[in-house]
Image (cartoon, rainbow, N blue to C red):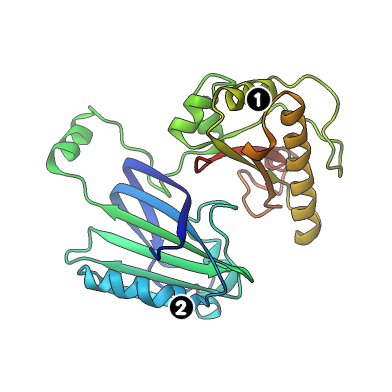
Amino acid sequence: MPALASEIGGRGESPSSLRLPEGPFDEGMIPLREVEGTVEQRAYRLQGRLTTLQLYEPLAAQIAAQGYATVFSCEADACGGFDFRYGMAVLPEPQMHVDLGDYRYLLAEKPGGKEVIALLVSRTADQGFVQVSSVTPLDAKAREAIRTGAVRAPAAGSGAPSAEEATQAAPAGDFGAAFATRGAAVLEDLVFASGSGGLEPGDYPSLKALADWLIAHPDRKVTLVGHTDASGALAANVALSKKRAQSVRAALVALGASGPQIDAQGAGYLAPRADNDTPEGRAKNRRVEVMLTPAL
C-alpha cells in the first residue's frame, strides 16, 4: 500500500471460502468463482484526491509482479454498476466505501488457480478506498483435519458469519469476545421510534456493557454503524441511520465512555441481514452495529 494508506478494517477466516466475480453482470447474474482456503479481506483508506485509476494501476502492477495472472478486470459500468457491486463480498461501511459510478475491480490467480487475489478500489471526493481479498490454499494437514471432522469447515458462501451467528458467538454483552471473533456486534436491544433518529428512553444492557468495555480499554476505538430497512429513498435512510448511530454515541458518552473513542456513521439500507420483503426481515435490518476500528 502507499505510505499514506491506513488499514481501517478487515476479517480473516480459516478454513473458509469466498465467492469472487470472474466476469461482468450480464443477463441477471454474475459469474462467481468459489475458492476455499485461508480467507483474508483488508480495507485501506488514503487521504487525497487520487483517481481510481491512480489507485488501481500501481497495485495491479504489484499483483502482476508477484506472479499473479489477470482473470478479469473491469470498471464501474462495464462491471455491471450496482448489480456487480452488490453481488460480491464487500466489507461494510465505513471500512470500505464504493462509489457505484467510480470503482475498479481485478481478479487474479497464481498458476493452478487455487491462490487468488481480488482488488477493489473506489473513492470519495477527497479519500481513496482499497479492498484486498485473498484466498490461499490450505496445507495437507489442515485439509485432512477437515476431511476427518477434526475441524468443521464453514458453509460455502462468502465465508462471513451471519449477524445472528456473530451475536451468538459470545455471551450477551461480552464485547471483548465479539470483537475477537468477528470484529463487530449488533446492539440488539435498542428501540427507536418509527422514522426517528432518537433512542427511546430506557435501560439498555448492551449500551452499559459497551460503555464499560470502552472505559476499560481507553486505547481502543469503535465505530457505530446505523442501518435501516429498504423503505424510502437511500439518501433519507442514510441520514436516518447516521442519526440513530449518533444517538447511541450520545448515550454511551452519558454512561461514561470517552467521545473521541466513538465514531458514528450510517449505511442506510445498503447492508441488509434479512429479506426486506417481510415485516420480520425489515425489523431485523433496522439496527445499530458496533465495529472495532484501529487503535487510537
Classify residue 100 as left or right of residue 168.
right
Which SS class for mark 2?
Answer: helix
Classify residue 37 as left or right of residue 186.
left
Q: Residue at x 56, y 29 (%)?
A: 218
Position in image of residue 274 (x %, y %):
63, 43
Say whether disc 1 or disc 2 marks the residue closer to the N-terminus: 2
Position in image of residue 292 (x %, y %):
53, 38
Q: Quadrant of residue 109?
A: bottom left
> Can you identify the residue that label 2 sits on?
54
Most extreme residue toward the left is 140
Q: CA distance from mark 1 to mark 2?
A: 41 Å
**Does residue 29 appear anywhere in the picture?**
no
- State whether residue 188 is above or below residue 272: above
Please, what is the three-letter code of the amino acid marked with disc 2? Gln
Where, quadrant-wise, is the N terminus in this rendering? bottom left
Query: Which mark, by number, is residue 84?
Result: none
What is the count of numbered marks?
A: 2
Q: Residues within 10 Å of mark 1 (few under 14, many from 20)?
A: many
Q: Quadrant of residue 73?
A: bottom left
- State whether residue 75 is above or below residue 99: below
> Can you identify the residue that label 1 sits on?
211
Classify residue 131 as left or right of residue 99.
left
Q: Residue at x 53, y 19 (%)?
A: 171
Q: Residue at x 78, y 19 (%)?
A: 203
Camera-side residue of 101 and 121: 121
Q: Residue at x 16, y 44 (%)?
A: 139
